[in-house]
Image: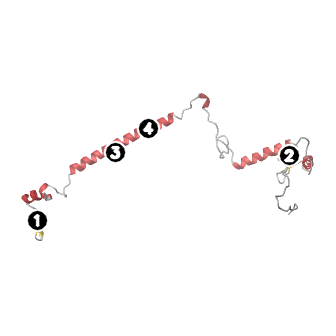
Amino acid sequence: MALGHVEQSPTDAQAELTGVHHPARVGYDPNNPKVSALVWFGVWFAVAMVVILAVTWVVYRGITRQYESGDVALSALSVERPPTPEPRLQPSPGHDVLPQVGVRDMFLRENAEFERRGWTVDEHTGQPVIPQPIVQQIAQLSASGVVPPNVQPAIPAAPNIAPAGATPQPAGR
């Protein structure tokens, strides 16, 4: 309560009438916290942390064991896993050659197959040379108007019909 220009604490009678109590009269002292309460808080906080960490570790171990036990083969027939699908990275299990070695081996296998079929491989370019009889046979088959017997075109030729009112254009324009 303010009495004049100086603030004073209310008397006990005034405090009962107004319901206002001065902090010093009820034992409130902000400069003296209870040290024992802080120590007990720290102890219980540490205990709670240890318990929470222990529970977390037990749950983690349980999940890990369950996951590992689920990775067991269900049948003796499926012990070996199938290889990963193509294309595989190089080198990898079952495909342990470097890319340049793999390409060189592929070219050697292809050249051996061409030579087995009677083709020759040009020594300078490394390209296979098609034998002349095969070239002549393909040229005869692809000549205009020549269709082997009993062979129908895959797609019949569309009729050359101009839309109504349009003038036909000569081919080549």
On the picture, is 38 further left or further right than 28? right
The local secondary structure at tag 3 comes to helix
* Displayed quadrant of residue 78: top right
Residue ID for mark 1: 8
Residue ID for mark 4: 61
* Residue nearest the observer in this picture, 93 or 54: 54
- Residue drawn 28% across the image and 48% down it: 42
Mark 4 or mark 2: name the one nearer the start of the chain: 4
The local secondary structure at tag 2 comes to loop
Tag of residue 27 = none
Q: Are marks 2 and 3 in contact (CB under 8 Å)?
A: no
Q: Are marks 1 and 4 in contact (CB under 8 Å)?
A: no
Tag of residue 49 = 3
* Displayed quadrant of residue 5: bottom left
Residue 142: x, y in percent? 90, 49
Q: CA distance from mark 1 to mark 4?
A: 66 Å
Q: CA distance from mark 1 to mark 2?
A: 116 Å
Mark 1 or mark 2: name the one nearer the start of the chain: 1
